[in-house]
Amino acid sequence: MSKQAVVIYGPPGSGKGTQAELLESKYSFIHFDTGKYIESLVHDPELRKNSLIKREKKLFDSGTLNTPAWVLSIVKDATIKIARAGYSIIFSGSPRTLFEALGDRSHGGLLAALINLFGRRNITILKLSVRPQTSIKRNSSRLVCSVCGLPILAASKIKNCALCGAPARKRIFDNPKLIKVRLKQYEDRTLPIIQKAKKLGLKVVQINGEPAPYKVHASVIRALKLK
Ligand SMILES: [Zn+2]
């Protein structure tokens, strides 16, 4: 079976991270999380003296956006390694910008790199859709373990962590006003990327993100023809 590259987009609370993790644990995809990868690089003691890393660490630690061309180049390098090692890859929520997706005159974008590495037919863009009120509801009622931080299903009757048994608490930074801003940002940023991807001849599949994660997972599996 051909290796696949999947890009999964969805508003906050659509469950894109969960879907990426399900693909990783059941189908041996590598879930490439750009934010986590940047964090691991800028905090890698072995790279401490590298001047580029020094510059990016400053930006990262102050909460400023990292240099777009640098982000694009490290993501492409990592993607090449993963593809050459023979794995399928899934991105959740990235590429985040048109520049990352398409590059410019002097930088090839991530989508072109994916086409080279995996072939156009083996790339799928999944768009998880949920209604704004679902996004707001899921984000404002999101529960996490008060000790280890693991997510706890808000719909479940058991409000203790499955890993350590500690009680759940509400995530405090998810207030409805903030979520509305994030929803708008998501639309403004993602829709143009999806338009361009279609123009490049890439398959875009919209999936209803309203049902429980395992049901959404079944739709994802069908869309990717994994069964
Ligand atoms: Zn816990």
Image (spheres, grey):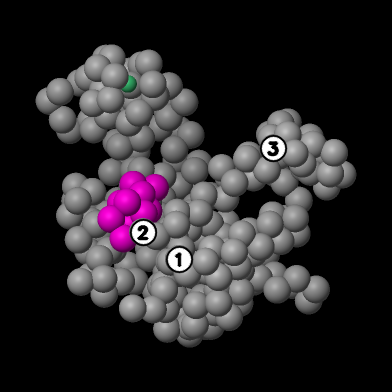
Q: Please identify the quadrant where the C terminus is shown.
A: bottom left
Which residue corresponds to mark 2? 28
Q: Quadrant of residue 58?
A: top right
Mark 1 / mark 2, whichever is N-terminal: 2
Q: Quadrant of residue 161?
A: top left
- Tag 2: residue type? Ser
**Residue neighbourhood size for the residue with mark 3, other residues' Cα within 10 Å, grouped as few (<14), some (14–19), many (≥20):** few
Mark 3 / mark 1, whichever is N-terminal: 3
At mark 2, the secondary structure is: loop
- Does residue 18 show up magenta in the picture? yes
Q: Please identify the quadrant where the N terminus is shown.
A: bottom left
Q: Answer yes or no: do the residues labelled 1 and 2 have beta carbons within 8 Å? A: yes
- Tag 3: residue type? Asp
Separation of marks 1 and 2 at Cα, in angstroms = 7 Å
Q: Position of residue 217 (x, y in %)?
A: 24, 57
In the depicted view, which residue is nearer to us: 200 or 111?
111
Q: Position of residue 215 (x, y in %)?
A: 17, 55
Q: Position of residue 145 (x, y in %)?
A: 33, 21
At mark 3, the secondary structure is: loop
Separation of marks 2 and 3 at Cα, in angstroms = 26 Å
In the displayed structure, does residue 50 sit left or right of residue 6?
right
Q: In this picture, which residue range is highlighted in magenta?
A: 17-27
Which residue corresponds to mark 3? 44
- Does residue 191 show up magenta in the picture? no
User: What label does residue 87 carry, if any?
Assistant: 1
Residue at the image position 28 percent from the left and 43 percent from the top:
134
